[in-house]
Image (spheres, grey):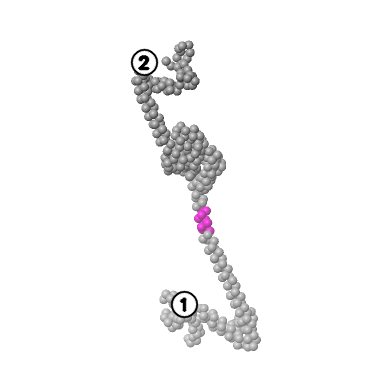
Amino acid sequence: MAWNEPGGGKQRDPWSGGGGAGGGGPDFERWLRNLNDRIGRLFGGGRRGGNGGGAGGAGGAGVGGIVLLLVGALLLWSAFDAFTVIEERERGVVLRFGKAERLMNPGLNFKWPRPIEEVRRVDFTSVRSVTEQARMLTRDENLVVLKFNVQYRVADPNLFLFGTRNPDDGLRLATEAAVRQVIGANTLDEILIGQRAVLVAEVRQVLQTMLADYGTGLELTDVNFQEVEPPQEVKAAFDDAIAAREDRERLVREAEAYASRVVPEARGEAARVTLESEGYKEVTIARATGAAARFSLLVTEYRKAPEVTRKRLLLETMQDVLARNPKVMIDVREGGQSLMYLPLDRILRERGVDGGDTLGSASPVQGAARPEPARAVAPPDPRREGRVAGRESRR
């Protein structure tokens, strides 16, 4: 009969003192026997009638062995569960009764068996990636389609597990917010043809600050703008504008190249002309100075001997004039002709020889192979030549 079954007007309590010999304390032996009987009945054994005490004792011994076996298995499982191996690419977060207690490094580590302590493994070294595409508004109220890629890894396993509910989704939303912030602060021209590396650096700085504020435990490794282009509806117009801008830059570069080539040449030419002018000035001044000195000496000599000086000037003048004349004059007074000349320049041209080059070396006889008819020329008037020389000397 169970202790709580009604009988005799009162319930029998195994924890009361009525079951023992002295009646002063709990009867543990009887309580253990009752527990053994219950386990025996659970597994199909137990006492059957009044004379089944020996069989019930044997069944209770078998059940006790099973209990010891279960206890041993539990202890063995606890011993195996107390050790855990963390791989090189992982970090383990130890939870003691659900609270983060410490961090496990790669290798064999000890912990209290469950449910006292539990280990959460986090991939610590792998680089994760997120690629998104969005249409954004620029500062000058233009639309641009931007495709960006973000690579990141876990920097703090504890924050990664318990800082936010879903760190990967939080990073995706934070990335889009950071990109919109940077793109919205720049014009379309600056985004399409500007310094893209500067924009990427700004996005990375803003995004890392947001991740730290949110407590995601993530660290950025790289941020890239894969595609930056206007919407398809206006892409043709933007392509024309970009082509015109590139043509302008090309023409500017060509003009700068032309200026860099022409300006030095012009400066060199100007320097050359300046030097030639200075040289011409010096030569002209020297010649004028020499001519003035010669005229002064000539005046002095003329005052001493006017006739001699006049005749000498006449001869020098005629020698200078005839030296530049391509005709040869021959003084023949026989036959009624006083003077004849030979057209040596025409004769030499017919022979294919430049008259100016060979005039000094050509012989009158050689040049007179085919002489033209002699032409009478009036002899010079000495009085006229004297008057001309006198005017020149007075000048």
Quadrant, the N terminus? top left
Name which residue type carries label 2: Gly
Q: Nearer the viewer, residue 74 or 132?
A: 74
The spot of residue 370 in percent (x, y) is: 42, 79
At horizontal 45% and vertical 82% (from top left) the residue drawn is: 364
Residue hosting label 2: 50
Magenta-colored span: 251-259
At horizontal 35% and vertical 16% (from top left) the residue drawn is: 51
Q: Residue furthest top?
A: 9
Is residue 337 positioned above or below 280 on the image? below
The spot of residue 49 in percent (x, y) is: 36, 15
Q: For label 1, count other residues whose C-alpha is less than 10 Å away and answer few (under 14), some (14-19) or many (20+).
A: few
Q: Is residue 278 left or right of residue 193?
A: right
Quadrant, the C terminus? bottom right
Q: Which mark is residue 383?
A: none
Is residue 286 positioned above or below 253 on the image? below
Q: Nearer the viewer, residue 184 or 376?
A: 184
Q: Nearer the viewer, residue 371 or 253?
A: 253
Residue hosting label 1: 357
Please identify the quarter of the rendering in which residue 181 is found: top right
Q: Is residue 390 visible?
A: no
Answer whether residue 104 is magenta in the image. no
Answer whether residue 255 is magenta in the image. yes
At horizontal 55% and vertical 43% (from top left) the residue drawn is: 186
Tell us which disc is closer to us: 2 or 1. 2
Q: Is residue 25 visible?
A: yes
Measure the C-alpha gap from mark 2 to mark 1: 165 Å
Name which residue type carries label 1: Asp
